Image: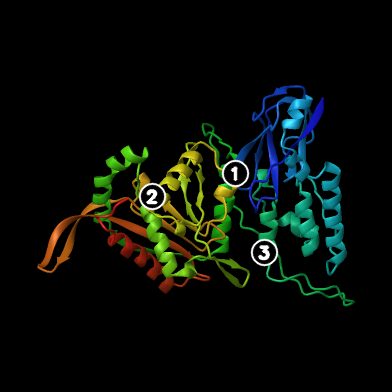
Amino acid sequence: MAQVELIMPKMGESVAEATIIKWLKNEGETIEAEESVLEIATDKVDSEVPSPVEGVLVKRLFNEDDVVQVGQPIAMIETDGAAASAAPAAKAEEAPKVEEVAAQVEQTVANATATATPAPTSVESTGDRFYSPLVRSIASEEGVSQQELDSIQGTGKDGRVTKKDILAHVANRGSQPAPATAAPVQKTTPAVSEPTAPPVPIGADDEIIEMDRMRKLIADHMTMSKRTSAHVTSYVEADVTNIVNWRNKVKDSFFKREGEKITFTPIFIEALVKAIKDFPMINVSVDGTNIIRHKNINMGMAAALPSGNLIVPVIKNADRMNLLGLTKTVNDLAKRARANKLSADEVSGGTYTLTNVGSFGNVMGTPIINQPQVAIMAVGSINKKPSVVETPEGDFIGIRHKMFLSHSYDHRVVDGALGGMFVRRVADYLEAFDPNREI
């Protein structure tokens, strides 16, 4: 008999830890190869961890709600010799032992504490607030006191402070802690208390529904975005008659050939990508007083889930895809989003976001920026309208398909001229769509 370590898998470059939501297998139970053993959650997505081998779960190394570092063993599975040899040895070699991981974390904290100037007060989990070793290490390195750490609003499970939360706090607090001096007097900034909502009256017949985990994350992310960015929205009405007529013409043949539908979404994304190339300062993020201009164009597309929640899959390097590639990628991400089959990498790294409020019959909206991006586009419903059509022979009234584009942007770095020109350029690309185009 042999034992194989079940390792916390790597879920993306920006994901360093995950929370165990639920164990699907108890100690002593038999596990099939590729059978899910537990459910985990990151700040971005929930997923299941399958077993690499067939065997018996002999020990669970962590409990539900524990935060585990990527690469750390989370369970031990007992197999026969053949199964153990068939297991991917590389995974076991890649992942450090529990003792090694603990030692590395302790050394990181020790190094951070030793080199910080001034040496910060050590931080720890207090009361009902748990801080992972990674968060505590960053707090020590950046001089974040226990009181300051306790004041950070967490976006993780049950309000837990994540790596992203503490890094954002450090970046936005304005300045590093002043070095320690002999002078007892220090310049301090009065703490600004968070606004509190008024008490909600609850009637005898009212129903109380607790938010699920994803809804809590969405609520925290949206309120954080409104506090972070100065939101401005510009609107343009676009004539998309050529696009509507073209799609009606090709949709049946496209479905027969490719086995899937062609929607308006990839056409909108194509126009957005072209406009971003024209105005690259839309494709940026803010880091303190620095503006980070992204080289890649990673397009987020907001997707509604059957639960009523929202998730934003990301099309990486959308500028390198043609319309057919965009169509297939959009359909694939939307399908797997509804089935909760997206990985953490597929919902992270976006540099601009598109949301389709028109799918619910809305003509326009004022979308909230998806941090750390600085802009988002909402496309409204397409409606037939009487419109003035200009021709060489003169103007006439015709029936046209029109829609509103709503462009919300961060006024800290995007002024009205840039924000307005950008949404106008998107409309220009949509209106210039070739009705004879092949796909």
Q: Of tags 1 and 2, which is closer to the observer?
A: 2
Element assignment for label 3? loop
Which residue is the extreme one toward the left? 393
Measure the alpha-carbon separation of dots 2 and 3: 51 Å
Quarter holding residue 236: bottom left
Dot label at residue 192: 3
Q: Is residue 273 left or right of residue 190?
A: left
Quarter holding residue 184: bottom right
Q: Of tags 2 and 3, which is closer to the observer?
A: 2
Q: Tag 3 or tag 1, which sits nearer the N-term?
A: 1
Q: Is residue 162 left or right of residue 253?
A: right
- The spot of residue 432 in percent (x, y) is 28, 62
Element assignment for label 2? helix
The answer to whether residue 308 is visible is no
Q: Which residue is mark 2?
A: 324
Measure the alpha-carbon separation of dots 1 and 2: 27 Å
